[in-house]
Image (cartoon, rainbow, N blue to C red):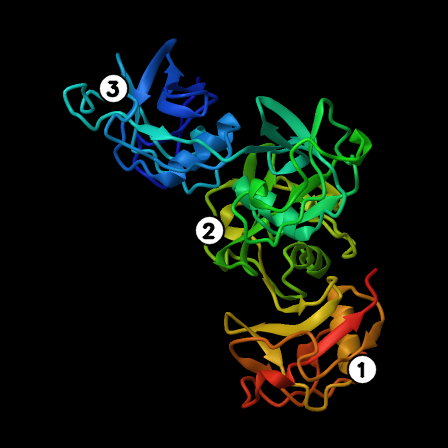
Amino acid sequence: KAILVHWSVLVDVCVLGHIPLRLSGGEGRCSGRLEVYHNTVWGSVCDDQWDISDAQVVCRQLGCGAALRADGNSVFGAGEGVVWMNRVECRGNEIHLWDCPLSLNNHTDCSHKKYILYTSFCILSAGNVRLVGGNNSCAGRVEVYYNGEWGTVCHDYWGVANTAVVCRELGCDETSNTMRAAHFGPGSGKIWMDDVGCSGSESSIFDCSKREMGDHNCKHSEDVGVVCSGRLVGGSRCSGRLEVPHGNTWYTVCAAAFDQQDAEVVCRELDCGAPVQVLGAAAFGKGDAQMWTQEIQCRGDEYQFALCPTSPSQFCSHENDVSVVCAVRLVGGNSRCAGRVEVLHDGEWGTVCDVDWDLPDAEVVCRELGCGEALTAPKSAYFGEGSGRVWISDLQCTGSEFTLTNCGLFGWGVKAIHAEDAGVSGLAL
């Protein structure tokens, strides 16, 4: 199979074709010494530079949940024969091990005479999670592995916090969307989970509150599905170079024909409020992922970037990677259109003081966030006190402005207390 050079590292560090993996010497299929099949021979992996990020990728590829440890020192015994891989350098969010930079060769410098040569690690998980039926491993019907059998999860009481936990557990971006029941088709077999309630901070869906495993009042027509979002790289969670998942691979998006409407969908999907800037010329650095070969044509009202229409685009290089900077969000409410107003400035989220805060100001926020009509403009930290900076005070919006930054305001960074944080309650569309 062809070996492609990963240009950011030395020539002998490569991205591989589809090479089978297995774990040997452990208890069950999800623990043991890592072995890879190459040139019709099973071989071991040297533990030079091996860490938990590498183990996470192997666990994900084998459908074994989250990695708990990445052990060296031949914990599961020394392998026999050839040592195929060395210097594996995964970030941890890759879908397959061959997406990571690594060296594929007969590594005689990792001989059996050295005690710590073989990469041995335990990847036992509290439970296993996968997404089925989507166009990549970060989208699909939620399925969990329990008692030796894969089964589905009912959508009763399912919320965005649950979705965030699933996406984070799978190594996908945790900001995401919950799809309607059976969006990715009904499953079969067991329905393992019902009435799942996550706070959002759990490391696994198995740690969330729920009925007893297998106890439910659902049908497979109620199986829940999720889509884990794209990501912004090189800046913060709400600013950076745009990358999107497709077909188990992350792609960089070109700035050609990318406009404000596209950025509105990206910021909305990432729960980052409204876009402030769309930047080209690799403003947050050149990506090293493959280039997305489609031109994005969002209307601006889509709730998910993957739902935007596309058309074939001309060749685009990493010299013109697109970046997005998002700016406004609502925090602490019971919907995406209600909460404490927070704005992003100088790379830091901060609140808005309620001095002169009124309904025209709230109208502008609702317009930015695609929330329709503003119903109320609560004051006095109605949605709870924020933290950090209070960025804006004395806003003078007429209600017709497109963004808060178009309104008259009293500078950036004001002396105010969080007991005066402003809020918005809008009509979610």
In the structure shown, which secondary structural element does the residue marked by tag 1 occupy? helix
Q: Which residue in the structure is indicated by mark 3?
A: 78
- Numbered disc in front, either 3 or 2: 3
- Numbered disc in front, either 1 or 2: 1
The amino acid beneath tag 2 is Lys
Q: Residue at the spot x=44%, y=17% of the render?
A: 1
- Spot occupied by residue 398 in the image (x, y as percentages of width and height): 80, 85
72 lies above or below 372: above
In the structure shown, which secondary structural element does the residue marked by tag 3 occupy? loop
Label 1–label 3 contact, CB within 8 A? no
Instruction: Please state if 38 lies on the left or on the right of 339 as rendered.
Output: left
- Spot occupied by residue 355 in the image (x, y as percentages of width and height): 68, 90
10 Å neighbourhood of mark 3: few (<14), some, or many (≥20)? many
In the structure shown, which secondary structural element does the residue marked by tag 2 occupy? loop
Q: Which residue in the structure is indicated by mark 1?
A: 359
Q: Residue at the spot x=79%, y=65% of the render?
A: 371
Q: Which residue in the structure is indicated by mark 2?
A: 286
Q: For residue 123, say whether it is visible.
A: yes
Residue 408 versus residue 119: which sits nearer the camera? 119
Q: Quadrant of residue 395?
A: bottom right
- Spot occupied by residue 8 in the image (x, y as percentages of width and height): 36, 41
Residue 291 versus residue 228: which sits nearer the camera? 228
Mark toward the start of the polypeptide (1 vs 3): 3
Q: For residue 316, say whether it is visible.
A: no
Mark toward the start of the polypeptide (3 vs 2): 3
Q: Residue at the spot x=80%, y=76% of the render?
A: 363
Instruction: Please state if 282 lies on the left or on the right of 423 as rendered.
Output: left
